[in-house]
């Protein structure tokens, strides 16, 4: 458990990213209120929440797509507000979006270096870019023999890894993963979780956004649960069990109330197929001659 | 085709054969088409076989190709420009009217036309960004605006439907030497736009495939949200692409002006589709993010060969447009087939 010891040794370090009472409102809608999060390097911070809990807003603030309207965000102890994703990237914060920010028709190496191309004079240094992309992907444990393949022809897990290794290569200290396992099967999810651990072992601060407490508990050091734009739970791994996390995530007290309501539901009961008494009304009978007359009248009418 | 297993972990990924790699290039369909058309007219039109006509065919192709190269780049960047056809006429008229009306050296007019053409491109791109409307709609608007301006301004300044002749005005000869001269290579007379066309194809193709701007163009066309997220300046890239079309329109407009001394104000309508068709024949996807500049030039060459081939073969030239329509659909089908063949190993 060297990884755990390493993490515990780092806990005393200053957080690289710190949100204090951070909030965002769109007009009269408070999408996020009073959020406090500290992200340390070499740790996985899991942000959980149901749909509409404010996870996306939180990512957008940290990634530099939106600015916050309340509180403060500190990078290395300095208060910052980002004006564009590029500024966030320059400070070492990289985001791997749900849609991965990869252009599907472009080659793997072109995508890997998109926005950060290596040049020799005015032209691209294609050979070096291909070599580096190949090496970085191999480090992450996937081998793509033909880097000229369009990204769209790769599997979901492979694309995820390209996006993660790209962020790692370009000097990210904090990497935000937006629901990386949401669209994947069980096996592919396992692959991605493995890369999350690899990114942590490489000394990165990982923010893992998910709504799956099982995935989160497998890799997380610290857990934050959002609900309706507020933090409802903020706990270290030592203070929680998976059952507690799942319970909190599913609504904790709300779930208790729901189970009271459902007590009379008798799960496991089998009910006989439904039998319907049809109404006593007979279907109308139309005289064929009458029908012919009506048809003729309609024709004349036209 | 070879099926070499590369990784034990995932044996679904196999290396592709050299043939399928070549077939995966977007311009392959157009090249095959160009050879087929050349073979057809070689067989049926004796005049097509004469060496001296190479210059004529290339010239016809170049007047489409100069624009097709810029339009293809714009399409790879995910946008259309329906005003490209009349923009050529607008540029020519701007130069002609400015020099004639103010009695200035024609070079002043030429510069004014360049400014106007680049501004029209920038305006198209900016309007697209501000309104968020599809470029099809925005440039359709510009198309009608320019068409009206061309006719109305020419009526006001020159009192008719064509600009006044510039041949008596200072600088005409030097401008003509730059934009509308010709030279001989053996029996072949090459007009200068052919040189510009080939130069433009090479430069723009290098720009697309070997510079970071090319990478950005592919990205904004393929997925502009993804491009923005990794820090590509999407709006600037798109505006620059529209300005590129403006530049090409200026170059062609200047050639037409100095070749014929005057410009007809109603010219150019409908040409925008010819440029788009040339780009599509060359392998550009209508949805953006994929295509080739060389392909678009080959598409223009197919046009040039067909246009003259029909005449040389003694067929009724009325059929030209019909032939184009058939070729467009056939080439798109061939491109799709080749692409699927190549990507499916």
Image: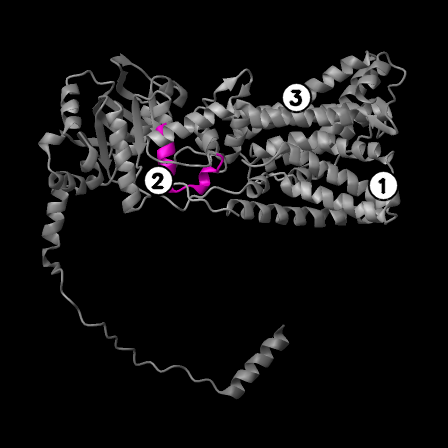
Task: Decide: is B31 above or below B257.
Answer: below
Mark 2 crowdedness (10 Å alpha carbons): few <14, some 14-19, many ≥20 = many
Q: Quadrant of the N terminus of chain A?
A: top left
Please provide percent x and percent y for residue A273.
22, 72
Magenta residues (range): A148-165
Query: Is A237 situated left or right of A302 in this image?
Result: left
Q: Which residue is mark 2?
A: A157
Tell me the SS state at disc 3.
Answer: helix
Task: Decide: is B237 above or below A185.
Answer: above
* Nearer-the-camera pick, A139 or B93: A139
Determine which of the numbered discs, if any, sits on residue A108 in the image: none
Tell me the SS state at disc 1.
Answer: helix
Q: Which residue is mark 1?
A: B49
Q: Residue at x 78, y 19 (%)?
A: B95
Chain assignment, label 3: B
Chain assignment, label 2: A
Mark 1 crowdedness (10 Å alpha carbons): few <14, some 14-19, many ≥20 = some
Chain assignment, label 1: B
Determine which of the numbered discs, if any, sits on residue B118 in the image: 3
Query: Is B62 situated left or right of A135 in this image?
Result: right
* Nearer-the-camera pick, B242 or A292: B242
Tags 1 and 3 touching, CB below 8 Å: no
Please provide percent x and percent y for residue B304.
77, 38
What's the magenta bit mostly, secondary-structure-wise?
helix
Please provide percent x and percent y for residue A269.
13, 65
Mark 3 crowdedness (10 Å alpha carbons): few <14, some 14-19, many ≥20 = many
Q: Quadrant of residue A298?
A: bottom right
């Amino acid at each position: 458990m060297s990884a755990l010891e390493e993490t515990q040794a780092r806990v005393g370090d200053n957080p690289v990213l710190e949100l204090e009472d951070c909030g965002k409102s769109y007009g009269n809608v408070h999408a996020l209120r009073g959020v406090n999060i500290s992200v340390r390097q070499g740790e996985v911070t899991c942000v959980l929440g149901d749909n509409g809990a404010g996870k996306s807003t939180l990512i957008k603030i940290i990634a530099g797509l939106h600015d916050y309207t309340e509180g403060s965000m500190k990078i290395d102890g300095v208060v910052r507000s980002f004006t564009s994703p590029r500024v966030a990237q320059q400070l070492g914060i990289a985001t791997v979006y749900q849609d991965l920010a990869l252009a599907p028709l472009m080659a793997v190496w072109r995508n890997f270096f998109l926005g950060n191309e290596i040049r020799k004079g005015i032209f691209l240094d294609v050979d070096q870019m291909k070599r580096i992309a190949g090496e970085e992907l191999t480090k992450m444990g996937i081998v793509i023999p033909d880097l000229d393949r369009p990204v769209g022809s790769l599997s979901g897990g492979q694309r995820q890894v390209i996006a993660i290794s790209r962020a790692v290569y370009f000097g990210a200290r904090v990497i935000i993963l937006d629901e990386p396992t949401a669209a994947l099967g069980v096996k592919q999810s396992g692959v991605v979780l493995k890369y999350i651990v690899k990114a942590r072992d490489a000394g990165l601060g990982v923010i893992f956004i998910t709504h799956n407490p099982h995935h989160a508990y497998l890799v997380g050091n610290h857990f934050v649960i959002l609900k309706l734009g507020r933090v409802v739970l903020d706990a270290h791994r030592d203070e929680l069990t998976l059952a507690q996390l799942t319970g909190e995530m599913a609504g904790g007290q709300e779930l208790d109330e729901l189970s009271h309501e459902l007590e009379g539901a008798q799960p496991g009961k089998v009910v006989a197929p439904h039998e319907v008494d049809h109404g006593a009304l007979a279907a109308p009978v139309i005289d064929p001659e009458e029908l012919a007359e009506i048809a003729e009248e309609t024709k004349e009418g036209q | 085709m070879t099926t070499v297993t590369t990784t034990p972990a995932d044996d679904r990924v196999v290396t592709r054969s050299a043939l399928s790699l070549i077939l995966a290039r977007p311009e392959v369909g157009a090249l095959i088409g160009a050879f087929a058309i050349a073979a057809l007219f070689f067989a049926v039109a004796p005049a097509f076989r004469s060496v001296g006509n190479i210059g004529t065919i290339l010239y016809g192709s170049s007047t489409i190709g100069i624009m097709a190269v810029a339009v293809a780049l714009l399409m790879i960047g995910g946008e259309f420009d329906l005003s490209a056809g009349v923009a050529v006429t607008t540029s020519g008229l701007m130069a002609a009217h400015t020099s004639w009306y103010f009695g200035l050296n024609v070079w002043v007019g030429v510069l004014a036309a360049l400014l106007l053409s680049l501004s029209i491109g920038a305006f198209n791109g900016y309007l697209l960004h501000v309104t968020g409307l599809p470029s099809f709609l925005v440039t359709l608007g510009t198309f009608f605006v320019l068409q009206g301006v061309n006719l109305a301004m020419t009526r006001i300044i020159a009192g008719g439907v064509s600009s006044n002749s510039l041949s008596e005005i200072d600088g005409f000869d030097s401008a003509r030497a730059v934009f509308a001269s010709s030279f001989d290579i053996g029996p072949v007379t090459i007009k200068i736009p052919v040189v510009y066309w080939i130069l433009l194809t090479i430069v723009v193709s290098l720009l697309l495939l070997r510079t970071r701007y090319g990478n950005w163009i592919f990205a904004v066309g393929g997925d502009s949200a993804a491009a923005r997220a990794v820090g590509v300046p999407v709006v600037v890239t798109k505006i620059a692409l529209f300005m590129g079309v403006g530049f090409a329109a200026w170059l062609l407009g200047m050639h037409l002006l100095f070749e014929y001394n005057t410009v007809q104000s109603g010219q150019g309508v409908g040409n925008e589709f010819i440029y788009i068709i040339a780009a599509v024949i060359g392998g550009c996807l209508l949805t953006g993010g994929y295509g080739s500049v060389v392909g678009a030039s080959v598409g223009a060459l197919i046009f040039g060969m067909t246009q003259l081939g029909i005449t040389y073969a003694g067929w009724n030239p009325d059929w030209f447009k019909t032939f184009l329509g058939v070729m467009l659909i056939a080439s798109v089908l061939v491109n799709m087939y080749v692409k699927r063949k190549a990507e499916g190993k």
